[in-house]
Amino acid sequence: MNIAILGAGAFGQALGKILTDNQHTVKYYDPYVYPDVNLDAATFEADTIVIAVPSLAIEKLLQDYPERLKKVPTILATKGLLSAEPFADFAQFSVLSGPAFASEIAEGKPATLTSSSPVAMGIFHNDQITIELCEDTNGILLCGALKNIYAIGAGYYSNSENMTAAFIQHAHAEMKNYLSDHDCDPATAELSCGLGDLILTCTNETSRNYRCGKMLAEGRSIDEIQDKLRTIEGLSTLLSVKTEKYQLLRQIKQLAGYQN
């Protein structure tokens, strides 16, 4: 198959490696990495489109998105969105999410991901990558967004392994409640996109959200942390999510110096 990947960052490149390993033809669209390749060229004759740009870049990407491309099966691999509403007029839209650091994927290490479409299973599944199917598209998206926020809290309390374990347990329970309150299936939080990604992101220095929490515990300001780490998906999501009803989300917002 001909597959276009929009976003050639570390994760986009890692997904591209899986696809080429599976004998698919991959083209990238990324004005920063491939400035000479425009969107039309990258998506010409594409059978499937994979979106892997940062969540903050989604709005800009969709501003002048061609109508013809909305008819092409599209898989969103971006984490940080709270709903699939921006893609409501896409004919065949699905998501892909789960515990997978780009560096490990690129090294050929195994991972299990969750997707809402058999298309993803068809193009990504192999001996390295296991794809589990779940029809709860918005639930998968919410898990990917919430775990980034919780990772900030886990980093803040990382000086105690006991506290980290308790934090993850409570975060998982709160994630399920959040899904239920937003018309999603709480069972989705039991999958790789939920519990699996939560454990990975809340226990690993590779996560910038986790490192953000550790730096907050050291007394560093948000401005200083953002200057050092640059993109911190959990912080941008934290500003969008309603936290009043949810103890840990509210607590993390206060730790970051944000008001409810």
Image: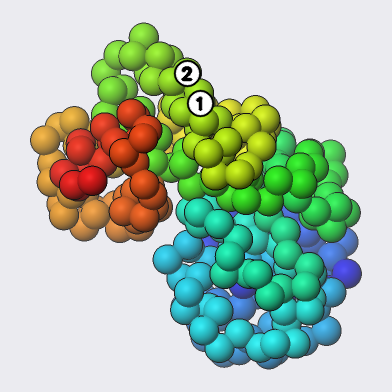
In the current view of this chain or complex, which residue is farthest to the top?
Answer: 162
Residue pictured at 62% horizontal, 51% vertical: 138
- The percent position of residue 120, horizontal first and vertical second, equals 79, 54
The foreground one among 46 and 254 is: 254
> What residue is rendered at 47% in x and 79% in y?
60
Q: Which mark is residue 172?
A: 1
Determine whether, in the image, residue 216 is placed left or right of residue 127: left
Q: Amino acid at mark 2?
A: Gln
- Residue 152 horizontal/vertical position (percent): 33, 37
Mark identifier at residue 223: none
Colour scheme used in the picture?
A: rainbow
Q: Quadrant of residue 45?
A: bottom right
Q: Quadrant of the N terminus?
A: bottom right
CA gap, disc 1 and disc 2: 5 Å
**Residue indicated by mark 2:** 169
Amino acid found under the numbered disc labelled 1: His
* Residue under the point 87% across and 61% down: 23
Res. 186 image quadrant: top right
- Answer yes or no: is residue 102 visible: no
In front here: 249 or 2? 249
Say what secondary structure mark 2 lies in: helix
Percent coordinates x, y for residue 92 in the rendering: 78, 68
Front residue of 240/155: it is 240
Q: Name the element at disc 1.
A: helix
Q: Quadrant of residue 129?
A: top right
Q: Are marks 1 and 2 in contact (CB under 8 Å)?
A: yes
Above or below, 115 relative to 81: above
Specify few, some or many for label 1: CA neighbours under 10 Å numbering under 14, 14-19, or 20 or more: many
